[in-house]
Image: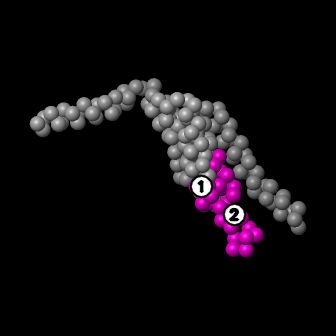
Amino acid sequence: MAAGWWETVGRVVEQEFADIGDPERITRLVLRLGMAALLGGLLGLERERSGKSAGIRTHMLVSMGAALFVLVTQQAGVLETDVSRVVQGIVAGVGFLGAGAILKSRGGDQVKGLTTAAGIWLTAAIGLSAGLGQEVTAVLSTVLAILVLSLESAFGRLGNKLRE
């Protein structure tokens, strides 16, 4: 009886990992998740260097998570039209995550963290792009985001001078 049980376990394990031998699938998975991690990390690096609370690890995890959700959906054989539901869920979920980064002062006259929240939201979109195989979109979005975030301090200084 025990031998039959172990044969069943062995067969199930073999079936569960049957796709690991497909080099094309593994390569695609590694490239897309790696790209999501790298691009998210670049945005996180900029935020960390600016002294913001959500840094490299947060942005990498958000980007990889978004990529993984769409990759798993595609691997499960879900119809392309149904992938949009997964995307909607990610956008809404990350919106709640970003909301946690927003702080309002007691007087209500100052709001902090909006740029960080928007950056987290954009990082999820970049991860989605990478996960869906839209590498050019993901890279260009990252470059533009870093440019905008880099200009943030210059625009802030200009705004302060105009207020004086």
Task: Looking at this view, name the residue that lies furthest to the bottom.
Answer: 107
Figure quadrant of the N terminus? top left
At 67% from the left edge and 52% from the top edge, which residue is drawn?
118
Q: Quick one: 32 or 108, which is closer to the camera?
A: 108
Specify the segment rendered in magenta. Answer: 97-122
Residue 14 appears in the figure: yes
Q: Quick one: 3 or 47, which is closer to the camera?
A: 3
At which x and y percent is residue 90?
57, 45
At 83% from the left edge and 63% from the top edge, which residue is drawn?
160
Residue 22 is left or right of residue 117, and the answer is left
Figure quadrant of the C terminus? bottom right
Indicate which label's residue lies in the foreground, 1 or 2.
1
Q: Quick one: 59 or 100, which is closer to the camera?
A: 100
> Considering only vertical position in the picture, is 24 above or below 115?
above
| Residue matched to label 2 | 112
At 18% from the left edge and 36% from the top edge, which residue is drawn?
6
Q: Amino acid at mark 2?
A: Lys
Label 2 sits on a secondary structure element that is strand
Q: Quick one: 92 or 69, which is closer to the camera?
A: 92
Is the Cβ of the residue at disc 1 closer than 8 Å to that at disc 2?
no
Residue 111 lies in the magenta stretch: yes
Q: Residues within 10 Å of mark 1 (few under 14, many from 20)?
A: few
Q: Amino acid at mark 1?
A: Phe
Residue 18 is left or right of residue 104, and the answer is left
Q: Residues within 10 Å of mark 2 (few under 14, many from 20)?
A: few
| Residue matched to label 1 | 96
At 21% from the left edge and 33% from the top edge, which residue is drawn?
8
First along the sequence among labels 1 and 2:
1
